Amino acid sequence: MLFLSDNAASVHPAVWDALQSADAPDSPYDGDAASAALDERFSDLFGRPCAVLWVATGTAANCLALASMVQPHGAVVCHEEAHIEMDEGGAPGFYLHGAKLILAQGEGAKLSPDAIRAAIDPIRDDVHQVQPHAVSITQASEYGCCYRPEEIAAIASLARQRGLALHVDGARFANAVAFLGCTPGDAVGPADALSFGFIKNGGMSAEAIVFFDPALADVARYRRKRAGHLQSKGRFLAAQLHAMIEDDVWLDNARHANAAAQEIAGACGERLMHPVEANELFVRCTAAERDTLRARGFGFYDWGADAARFVTAWNTRDEDARALARAVAAL
C-alpha cells in the first residue's frame, strides 16, 4: 500500500493507448500533427491563446519557462520551500546561467504580495545588486495548499506593477483545479507561463509548458533545443498530453486522488500539519508510530524527525485509503 509519491503511480490506460496510436510515421521533433495541435487544444482549455511546448520532466518545464523570462543577471522570487529551491538540484541556476533565487516566506509554502514585497523592497535599483525579473508560485503548493483565484490575482497585480513576469509551477495543477472547482483559467490566473504537470497524474513521460505570452514561447523553443529536450519523436510526448486532456482524464484522475486524501485526512485530526486541499498529507507522528505503520504494509516518506508525508494518486485504491485512515486513527 504505497503512499510514497504520485510519481510512483502507474501510467493511465488512455496514455498507453495514445502512445500505441502515435506509433506511425510522422514529421520528427515537434513538426508532427499532434504537436501542432497542442496550441489550439490548450487554448480551448484555458479560454485564451496559448503556445504549448512538451518536455520530459517537471524540472525542465520549470526551468525552461523561467529561462525565457529571466536574464542571467536577474532573479526569481519564490517561496523558501519551493520545488525550484529545494528539489531540483540547482537546475534553475544551470538553465538560467547563474540567475539567482530570492527566497520569501509564507504559510503553507504559499507566497503573498506582502511576502514578495518583504523580499524585494530592500533591493537597491543599481547594478551592484541582483534585480528580480520574475515571481514563481506553486499551484498546489509544496504543502498541498491551493491559491485561490483572488490570491493569484493579487500577486499578478504586484508583479505587473514591478515589471515582473509570473510563472506557475503546476506539478499538481490538476489537483488544485479539482479542489477549487473552478476553471483551469481561474486556477492559473493572469500568469505568463504555467508548468502543467501530467506525470504525477497518470502521464508517462510528458509535461507541458503553457505560455500565455507567445513571445516567451519563441524564446523557449531555442532554449529547449539547446538543453537537449527537443526529442526527435516528439509525437509520443504530444500524444500523452492529448490523451490526458481528452474527456477530462486529467481532472477525473485528480479528483480521485484528492478524494483518497480526504478519506485519510478525516482520521488524522490534530495530527495534520497543513490543510489537505490536494493529494498530499503531512501528518505528525513519532518514529515508533511510523514503524507501526510500515509494519502494517504502508509505504511513505518521513518528513523530518516527527512527521510523515503521504501522497495519494489517481490509482490509489479506495480500500488502501480506508486502511491507512483506520491505521492512523488507531495510533
Image: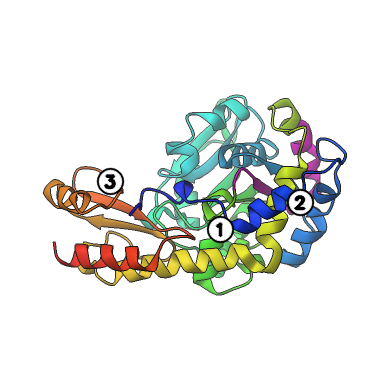
For the residues marked 2 and 1, what is the alpha-carbon distance in whole angstroms? 27 Å
Instruction: Report the amino acid beneath label 2.
Output: Ser
Query: Is the N terminus in the top left, top right, bottom left or bottom right quadrant?
Result: bottom left
Percent coordinates x, y for residue 147 in the rendering: 50, 63
Percent coordinates x, y for residue 329 in the rendering: 18, 67
In what element is the residue under mark 2?
helix
Instruction: Report the amino acid beneath label 3.
Output: Trp
Q: Residue at x 44, y 63 (%)?
A: 278
| Residue 167 on the magenta span | no
Q: Residue at x 52, y 64 (%)?
A: 254
Please indicate whether residue 213 sits to the left or right of residue 280 in the image: right
Instruction: Report the amino acid beneath label 1.
Output: Phe
Query: Is the C terminus in the top left, top right, bottom left or bottom right quadrant?
Result: bottom left
Pointer 2 or 1: first along the chain: 2
Question: Which of 205 and 280 lies nearest the eye of the viewer?
Answer: 205
Q: Residue at x 45, y 58 (%)?
A: 313
Residue 45 in the image: above or below residue 139: below
Q: Which residue is mark 1?
A: 173
Residue segment shown in magenta? 204-222
Q: Which residue is mark 2?
A: 21
Pointer 3 or 2: first along the chain: 2
10 Å neighbourhood of mark 3: few (<14), some, or many (≥20)?
A: some
In what element is the residue under mark 3?
loop
Q: Which residue is mark 3?
A: 303
For the residues marked 3 and 2, what is the alpha-carbon distance in whole angstroms? 41 Å
